[in-house]
Amino acid sequence: MPTTLHTSELPGLELLHRGKVRDVYVLPGNRLLMVASDRLSAFDVVLPDPIPGKGEMLCQISNFWFAKTAHLLPNHLTGEDVAAVLPDGVDPALYARRSVVTRRLKPLPVEAIARGYLIGSGWKDYQRSGSLCGIRLPAGLQQAARLPEPIFTPSTKAAVGDHDENVSFDAVVRAIGGDLAEQVRVATLQVYRFAASLAAERGIIIADTKLEFGLDEAGQLQVMDEMLTPDSSRFWPASEYREGISPPSYDKQFVRDYLETLDWNKSAPGPRIPAEVIEGTRQRYAEALKRLAGIELD
Ligand SMILES: Nc1ncnc2c1ncn2[C@@H]1O[C@H](COP(=O)(O)OP(=O)(O)OP(=O)(O)O)[C@@H](O)[C@H]1O
Ligand SMILES: [Mg+2]
């Protein structure tokens, strides 16, 4: 059975950060415990109703990709057993499949995005300027067009409530230095190409994805946070892809469509959602996990 967890509670552990979806705790030995909750955010607002098992699915999909890409670049996972680091009295079954133990890295102040298709803020920038993050693109591309080749389109990490902003590669060089900037660019595109071709075999288009990187104590670059989840990427069923529209995404489109039927101003607090929309959303996450990673959580 999937477990349901809206907000984690781990008495005795220091809570470092509660994001929209994940809760991050400090562990001794310069490590973190990252817990993926079942919170669902839409239009940047966390909804009051959890999606049962969503955090487990997110965590498992991320773990799948970290393992699959380990030959390309090192990642933040220590591989330690979650149950071993939980405080006494906490039910391990609730946390085991939705949490990971990681090295605590020094985060680089850049969202490393790779795009294979022209959508979202990339499409907006292109319409305005014909370029994306300073990269000139062919004229006349339509929304959701496949790009001639995948491109690295970094953005700044915005403070809570702000939206991230696309920046040029030069801005990344100024922020973290040329060597690191180049390493991040190459690694991001490598991961994207690898994952996109694996997903394509399974009928899924990865339109774009965002990675985060950090440095370990020796100054070595590692990929951290989450990897190639529906929250950090756009997954499109290949069967529903076409140019000129915004193709439906695997996960949140369903709940967004429902929310659009409401008279809600898209600011907090978010509305309650009906049981069938919760279940439909859960099924879409499960479908993504099954098709991409071949994983079925009971
Ligand atoms: N190995 C790591 N070492 C240090 N920090 C990390 C590591 N992995 C992830 N992080 C950071 O932990 C935080 C995870 O937060 P989370 O992604 O849940 O929320 P958020 O980024 O604040 O907001 P959002 O919900 O929009 O993603 C991020 O700030 C991320 O950069
Ligand atoms: Mg985040």
Image: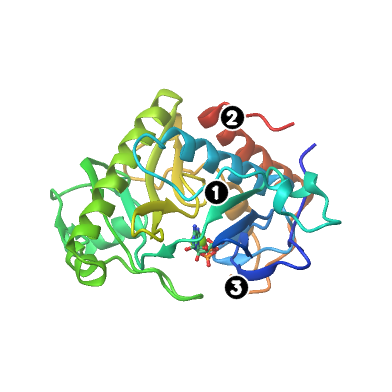
On screen, residue 82 versus residue 214, left or right, reads: right
Q: Indicate the quadrant where residue 244 lies.
A: top left
Q: Which element is circle 2 on?
A: helix
Q: Nearer the viewer, residue 8 or 231?
A: 8
User: Can residue 260 be seen in the rendering of this structure?
Assistant: no
Mark 1 element type = helix
Whole-number angstrom distance, CA of label 3 to CA of label 1: 18 Å
Corner quadrant of residue 182: bottom left
Instruction: Give how far apart the Cα atoms at labels 1 and 2 are.
Output: 18 Å
Q: How is the image coloured?
A: rainbow
Q: Which mark is residue 265?
A: 3
Which residue corresponds to the image point at 29% horizontal and 46% vertical from the top-left?
187
Point out the image quarter for the N terminus.
Answer: top right
Residue in the image at 61% along x and 39% along y: 284
Which residue, given by chain and number where applicable, does mark 1 sit on?
253
Depth check: give the residue in front, 217 or 201. Answer: 217
Asked if labels 2 and 1 touch by Cβ distance under 8 angstroms, the answer is: no
Between discs 3 and 2, the one toward the N terminus: 3
What secondary structure is found at the residue carrying circle 3?
A: loop
Which amino acid does the dot numbered 1 rest on? Gln
Res 6 → quadrant:
bottom right
